[in-house]
Image: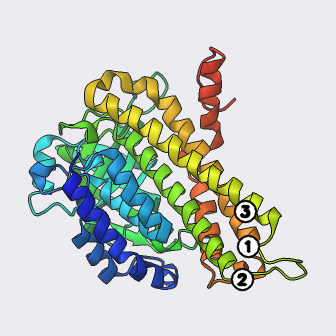
Amino acid sequence: MREDDSARIMAAVRDLGPTIAGRAGEIDGARRVPADLLAQLRAAGVMRMFVPRSHGGAELELRAGQEILEALARVDGSTAWTVMIGAESPQVLALLPRARFDAIYAAGPDVVLAGGSSPQGEALVVEGGYRVTGKWTFASGCEHCDWMIGNCVVMQDGQPSPGAAPGTPELRGMIWPAAAGRVVDSWHALGMRGTGSHDIAVEGQFVPASDSLDLFAGAPSVAGPNFVAPVLHILAHMAAVAVGLAQGALDEVVTLARGGKKRVFARASLAESPVFQIHLGRAEMDVAAARALVRATSEEFWAACVADPAAVPAIVPRLSAMLAWVVETCTRVVDACYRAGGAGAARDASPLQRRFRDMHTLSQHAVAAEGFLGQVGALRLEQPAGFWS
């Protein structure tokens, strides 16, 4: 554990908390985190927290990073998500050849990668690499990134190249400098409005073979537990953001109740209402349970990354189900807080309304789908662990 770096970054994040909270409306309205606030976040070290120390980063352990992401989400979901995407960049880029990873980080540790993991592009095999064309959705942070990535179907002689599994095409992630790509202004969403999750596109972009990678089955070129199974680290990070959003909603509704909030036609204030106290107590326990599950599952995953990477595949169903359950539980908490806030919570200026929108937007993410809970159920029944049934 890099305790000094972890404590320093967390302290900087907490110092920035009031500033981020005060600019939440601005972040939503601009549909991105403002450049000056991004600069402060970079200076705090959040974008480099998983970068190897050999490359100028903090190389934090998983739980330390999750605690920082949760603290940010407790203040503002869009800021936390933006930081999460930036902080995960080295874990994806580590799937490149080591020489390319070293070259990309030669200029400094605060490298941000943005793009899409769905195969929404085509990569035509040409001499020395690929010719890439496509458009990818939900590219969070694309307006301030250094590099873009798009997962592609590899094409050769007019046909998809066969993948490792019979009947599937070969997929590879292609990266290119952000200046060579195009941002398509498309991010008009219910929540997480400040993440700048626009579409990105390229047309006929040459990508050297050394700038391509296998997102889901690639072997990392960088040693260390942070670089074992990068996609699974991303699931663990998302769970921490969900817990932070729910905790933030609880903070807001408690502030309302302590301030004397009384619903129209109610006999008692929220703070004096036994019914509200029950709902609040249930919500508190739900968040505590979600946080505890995130911690326990993440610690199991991290221990495998440290000591026995071969054990990681067996943890995948539980890690995926953990995220689905945590998001489902945290959404329930945020909904309860929003209802308790009364009519005022429906206003755009209400932090509860923003958290309600952010949480429901996060809950729509493909990797948080309830179908992943079925994997654990299937294993319990000694049945094949498929996704949908």
Q: What residue type is labelled 1?
A: Ala
Closest to the camera, between mark 2 and mark 3, is: 2
Q: In which quarter of the image is residue 268?
A: bottom right
Q: In this view, does 377 lie to the left or right of 143?
A: right
> Which one is earlier in the sequence, the residue at label 2 or at label 1?
2
Q: Which amino acid does label 3 sit on?
A: Ala
Disc 3 is placed on an element classified as helix
> Which one is earlier in the sequence, the residue at label 2 or at label 3?
2
Residue occupied by mark 3: 336
Residue occupied by mark 1: 271
Residue occupied by mark 2: 260
Residue shown at 34% from the left, 36% from the top? 302
Spot occupied by residue 176 in the image (x, y as percentages of width and height): 25, 58
> Which one is earlier in the sequence, the residue at label 1 or at label 3?
1
How has the structure been colored for display?
rainbow
Question: Label 2: few (<14), some or many (≥20) within 10 Å?
Answer: few
Does any portion of residue 114 appear in the rendered image? no
Q: Which amino acid does label 2 sit on?
A: Gly
